[in-house]
């Protein structure tokens, strides 16, 4: 049945609700979605959109996964809520399922209801455990959540607005990114001695009172920045040598997005604390999980854990975990995502060959970035960090054009987020590439042409 939504209906919604992360005048004409299935969603005019970003990089198994939906419905009928002080079946099944996939040393979990809260709990836990050391080293290209702790750890321009509102906490410093396309040291991979990691050692020693290094293993919104293979093994060493915790935010990079359950497995490095959310329930229910090492868990045998929520261990939320993990295992066992990710990579590189506005195509697994530039030679961007929230962005223009043509894709101030559900097929990848081919023309027209080819910064790590 077609349900047409009038401008009046949409006006009613946008007039009385705050749109997220925007000046409200930008919240006037959202697309009204009535359904979604597999890798597609449908609006009320029956227009179909291919989901090339898994919504907010969270529906890793796609839309309307039956097994997860059935488990949630059953739980709603049986026990929709019970206080976190009681044990219950969804808590049991989720814990067991998590234990079957997480690193063996991270076997104690704190449950909340968002990625932000998972990180917030990680901050409280690490600061209690490491007291009196309290400083946290984050990185400039990062996002860690929407509350005071999350925004304080965030390197992107959302923190600038939070700072102006005095909505940040002290004790956070920012390290240079492992960003080979724009190396902060002006070096080239292969001749850099992984300065981005070495500098963290310098920071720890110079700062004093550093309790933790807090990083996204593959940077999410801020660029799908894949670090060189030597980066995390060296960072782990630096943390150990300096008695500093390594905390990783796998809210977006987790749940097979990079080919492994967690991105850190790509480098065989285990953190002391891992925070995750999003794909853990395929985003059908809002879950945050903070996992800690045994040593940290032992510390809280005597020290009170100062974290808790009415919705901690929420049965409806938890009921999605076990079926989601079972579905991930089933899908990975078919070898389908492992076969499609190199195909996606190949097609994105071809796109880069055709479009001079793509400065760098980089990524891993089903987690890719097209960094959009005006000039490949100088790497000048169309828009900088300072433009975000304040100026029209070229990346938004490209995404809007793609949306017109039936492709949904998230965009940040200088990059497009290609992160489709793991169930996407090769022909659906082709469908997305075909639309991107047309949409990227919007930026190509304004490129200052050079003969410089696009970069493939993450490809260098495979050699
Ligand atoms: C790396 C990372 N950390 C934390 C968050 C915050 O998670 P949530 O939006 O569930 O609060 C996000 C959200 O996109 C994220 O990408």
Image: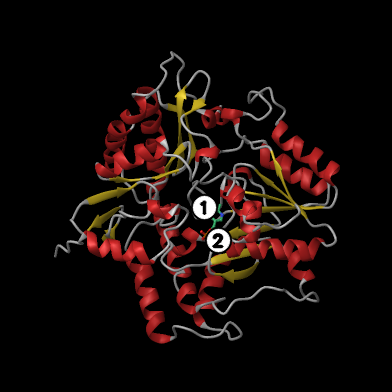
Q: Looking at the figure, which quarter contains the N terminus?
A: bottom left
N-terminal of the two: label 1 or label 2?
A: 2
**Residue at x-position 52% and y-position 68%:** 97
SS assignment at label 1: loop
Tell whether circle 2 marks a residue whose Cβ is less than 8 angstroms from ligand 1. yes
Tell whether circle 1 marks a residue whose Cβ is less than 8 angstroms from ligand 1. yes
**What residue is disc 2 on?**
115
Mark 1 and mark 2 in contact? Answer it, CB < 8 Å. Answer: yes
Image vertical order of residue 311 relative to residue 86, above or below: above
SS assignment at label 2: helix
Q: Quadrant of residue 78?
A: bottom left
**Residue at x-position 51% and y-position 25%:** 380
Mark 2 residue crowding within 10 angstroms, few (<14) / some (14–19) / many (20+): many
Question: Real-space Cα distance between discs 1 and 2?
Answer: 9 Å
**Residue at x-position 32% and y-position 65%:** 13
**Frontmost residue, 49 versus 107:** 49
**What residue is disc 1 on?**
252
Mark 1 residue crowding within 10 angstroms, few (<14) / some (14–19) / many (20+): many
């Amino acid at each position: 049945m077609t349900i047409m939504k009038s401008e009046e209906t949409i006006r009613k919604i946008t007039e009385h609700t705050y749109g997220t992360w925007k000046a409200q005048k930008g919240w006037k004409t959202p697309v009204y979605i009535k359904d979604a299935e597999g890798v597609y969603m449908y609006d009320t005019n029956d227009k179909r959109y291919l989901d090339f970003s898994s919504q907010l990089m969270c529906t890793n198994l796609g839309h309307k996964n039956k097994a997860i939906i059935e488990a949630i419905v059953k739980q709603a009928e049986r026990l929709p809520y019970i206080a976190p002080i009681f044990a219950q079946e969804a808590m049991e099944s989720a814990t067991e399922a998590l234990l079957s996939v997480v690193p063996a040393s991270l076997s104690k979990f704190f449950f909340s209801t968002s990625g932000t809260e998972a990180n917030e709990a990680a901050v409280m836990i690490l600061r209690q455990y490491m007291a009196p050391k309290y400083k946290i080293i984050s990185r400039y290209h990062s996002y860690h959540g929407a509350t005071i702790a999350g925004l304080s750890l965030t390197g992107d321009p959302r923190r600038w607005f939070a700072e102006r509102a005095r909505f940040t906490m002290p004790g956070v410093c920012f390290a240079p990114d492992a960003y080979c396309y724009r190396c902060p040291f002006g070096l080239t991979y292969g001749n850099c001695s992984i300065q981005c990691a070495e500098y963290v050692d310098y920071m720890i020693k110079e700062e004093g009172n550093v309790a933790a290094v807090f990083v996204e293993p593959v940077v999410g919104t801020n660029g799908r920045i894949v670090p060189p293979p030597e980066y995390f093994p060296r960072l782990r060493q630096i943390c150990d040598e300096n008695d500093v915790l390594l905390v990783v935010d796998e809210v977006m990079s987790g749940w097979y997005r990079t080919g492994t359950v967690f991105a850190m497995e790509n480098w065989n490095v285990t953190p002391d604390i891992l925070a995750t959310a999003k794909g853990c329930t395929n985003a059908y229910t809002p879950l945050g999980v903070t996992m800690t090492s045994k040593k940290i868990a032992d510390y809280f045998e005597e020290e009170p854990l100062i974290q808790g929520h009415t919705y901690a261990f929420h049965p409806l939320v938890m009921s999605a975990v076990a079926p989601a993990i079972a579905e991930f295992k089933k899908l990975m066992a078919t070898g389908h995502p492992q076969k499609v990710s190199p195909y996606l990579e190949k097609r994105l590189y071809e796109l880069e060959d055709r479009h001079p506005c793509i400065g760098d195509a980089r990524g891993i697994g089903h987690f890719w970035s097209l960094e959009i530039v005006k000039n490949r030679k100088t790497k000048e961007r169309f828009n900088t960090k300072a433009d975000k929230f304040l100026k029209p962005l070229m990346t938004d223009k490209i995404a809007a054009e793609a949306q017109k043509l039936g492709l949904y894709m998230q965009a940040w101030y200088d990059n497009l987020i290609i992160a489709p559900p793991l169930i996407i097929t090769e022909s659906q990848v082709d469908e997305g590439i075909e639309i991107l081919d047309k949409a990227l023309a919007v930026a190509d027209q304004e490129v200052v042409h050079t003969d410089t080819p696009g970069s493939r910064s993450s490809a260098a790590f495979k050699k």
